[in-house]
Image (cartoon, rainbow, N blue to C red):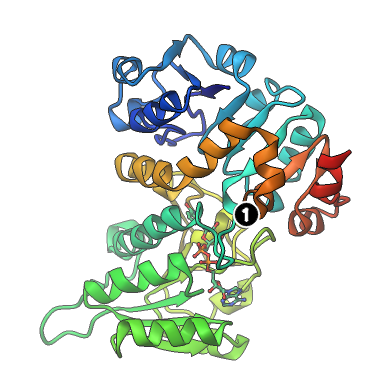
Amino acid sequence: MLIGVPKEIKPDEYRVGLTPSAVREYVAHGHRVLVGTGAGDGMDADDAAYRAAGAEIAANAKEVFDRADMVVKVKEPLPSEIALLRPGQILFTYLHLAADLAQARGLIASGATAVAYETVTDAEGRLPLLAPMSEIAGRLSIQAAAHALEKPQGGRGVLLGGVPGVLPGKVVIIGGGSVGTEAARTAAGIGATVTVLDKSVPRLRILDEMFAGRVVTRYATRGAVAEEIASADAVVGAVLVPGASAPKVVSRADLASMLRGAVLVDVAIDQGGCFETSRPTTHHQPTFMVEGIVHYCVANMPGAVPRTSSEALNHATLPFGLALADRGLAAVARDPHLRDGLNVHKGRITHRAVAESLHLDFSDPTDLMAA
Ligand SMILES: NC(=O)c1ccc[n+]([C@@H]2O[C@H](COP(=O)([O-])OP(=O)(O)OC[C@H]3O[C@@H](n4cnc5c(N)ncnc54)[C@H](O)[C@@H]3O)[C@@H](O)[C@H]2O)c1
């Protein structure tokens, strides 16, 4: 198969779909890899490094999309990229379609087969291609909150860790999955007071054991969330209902009860955001104020640390990408976990939660592939 890797064009996105070492693996499996010039700039992997790994360099995205059987990316395709997709071509990348009707319509019209990283599952029902980026975003969320809490940034002027004799800041984390766990670890690590809320008691039990008293866990009723955020310096929104748009756990009305200059970090913004007042921001202009509360809503947080995140992402995607390259759609038909990743095929939405979120018709992928 010819695998295409275009340079990411989303603002402030410095990651790359395949690192040179991942290219080497595809080449070892007998595939050819075509990499857009400069695609690895963000992690200091130049065209020469890709050539040394066995790739060919394409002059532009059009050449990559025109020639590739499968396009491997990081972020969802932007309209100019969707226009380059063709029927039968495989697109393997993050899509986050549930909150993006325009992109869904574009992919449906393209006729391409889109496999979304974020809905591929593993044997335990977890999301193995979301987890590494979630771990990074979780750790970054506390760095972001700490910075935004500084007075010149509009924050309350609180040092999360405190100092001897002065109380530390309070961090409230809503959603205790991959993002929430790493946010809790980082916040506790710098000495903040940490509460994690989740709707899953088994998950709270795991966190309770993991942090051995260093983090408080609480079941996420509306009342408990309202009570916790009222005294928080920073709130991290890290909820997820797989494939669906994020549930709103903090309303505009709730902001009135919060401390002025407190910080909301909405990590779930890529699924539409879990705070009513959130809207997506970029690394260039990461925050905005609503009713005296600082909002940080960067939709591609790991893009800020492309060296770490490109490597971590490639480690997770490689086995699935190689399966697609080696066996094409037969890999999707054979592997239920890869099939969970199938979001769009033959102009139809093939992921139930995505279809429901977008109010579009759902088509069973097994029936569609057999047809
Ligand atoms: N902004 C970014 O750059 C970025 C990067 C990585 C991940 N994310 C997003 O972060 C979010 C969390 O990802 P994750 O990997 O941690 O997911 P996860 O599935 O590991 O964890 C989500 C947790 O939310 C809990 N939950 C669901 N609904 C809830 C509710 N109403 N109240 C409280 N808890 C609730 C679940 O029980 C689960 O424990 C996702 O939307 C993901 O796409 C964003």
Residue at left offset 41%, top offset 26%: 28
For ligand 1, give the image quadrant. bottom right
Q: Quadrant of the N terminus?
A: top right
Q: Quadrant of the C terminus?
A: top right
Position in image of residue 41 (x %, y %): 34, 25
| Residue at mark 1 | 337
Residue at left offset 69%, top offset 26%: 89
Q: Quadrant of residue 167?
A: bottom left
Q: Classify 74 as above or below 210.
A: above
Is residue 19 rendered to the left or right of residue 203?
A: left
Position in image of residue 173 (x %, y %): 44, 75
Most foreground residue, 337 or 39: 337
Is residue 27 rendered to the left or right of residue 200?
A: left
Q: For mark 1, does the 10 Å Cα neighbourhood hold few (<14), some (14 to 19), or many (20 or more) residues?
A: many
Is residue 298 rendered to the left or right of residue 345?
A: left
Position in image of residue 14 (x %, y %): 39, 34
Q: Quadrant of residue 170?
A: bottom left
